[in-house]
Image (cartoon, rainbow, N blue to C red):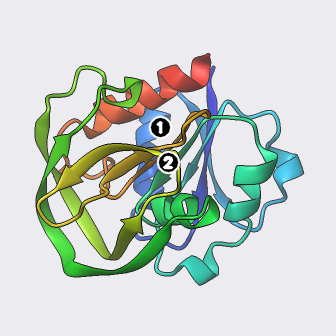
Amino acid sequence: MVKIYVVYNYGQYNHLIHRTLRDLDVESKLIPNDTPASELKDLDGLVLGGGPTIERAGNSFLYLDELDIPILGICLGLHIIAEHFGGEVKKGDVGEYSEVSIHLLKDDELFDGIPEVFNVWASHADEVKRIPEGFVHLAKSEVCEYEAIKHPQRPVYGVQWHPEVYHSEYGEEIYKNFIEICKR
């Protein structure tokens, strides 16, 4: 059984990420963000959950350095990835708490079987304003340029929206694709 843990960064939807993975037959656990990286070495993947501020991200930055496993950042998780690798996060021009249309820009295994345009539920005030050098720009929307990014060499992804909520189209498919990436 695939083992993917969810880092609790104090976000309102972190428990839904955990439940989505569990419902997809993944061994999953919601863990505190101060869990030592050494306790996570046997995982197949990790999800950096959302939360209110990057200042409360605990060991999330450390996990990006010390774990050689697929990592998916959701909302704040995306911001952590972007900042850690040299990108820039700032207040968004439009604070999103609504439905947003995502436009995929590149083919990627995280979005296998998903149409080029689909609607999701977004809930955030901050956004990535500049992606780290070399990162792949995977998706945008009319209100946020960097809705999804990927590390140039590693299976490290970030998405701005919440695939785990009911209102997000193809959310379950995104998690299924991430599970497949973690199986390799």
Separation of residues labelled 1 and 2 (CA atoms):
5 Å
Secondary structure, mark 2, is helix
Residue type pointed to by label 1: Leu
The residue positioned 63% from the left and 72% from the top of the image is 57
Report the side of 19 relative to 167 (left or right).
right
Q: Is residue 6 above or below residue 44?
A: below
Which residue occupies 53% across, 73% down?
Answer: 10
Measured from the top left, where is residue 174 in percent x and y? 34, 34
Query: To which quarter of the image does residue 41 belong?
Result: top right
Name the amino acid, label 2: His
Q: Position of residue 161 (x, y in %)?
A: 30, 57
108, above or below 85, in the image? above
Horizontal side, residue 118 vs residue 59: left or right: left
* Image quarter in which the C terminus is found: top right
Q: Residue 160 lies in what quarter of the image?
A: bottom left
Q: Nearer the viewer, residue 24 or 134?
A: 134
Report if the CB atoms under discs 1 and 2 are less than 8 Å apart. yes
Q: Which residue is mark 1?
A: 21
Residue sitting at 14 percent across and 28 percent down? 115
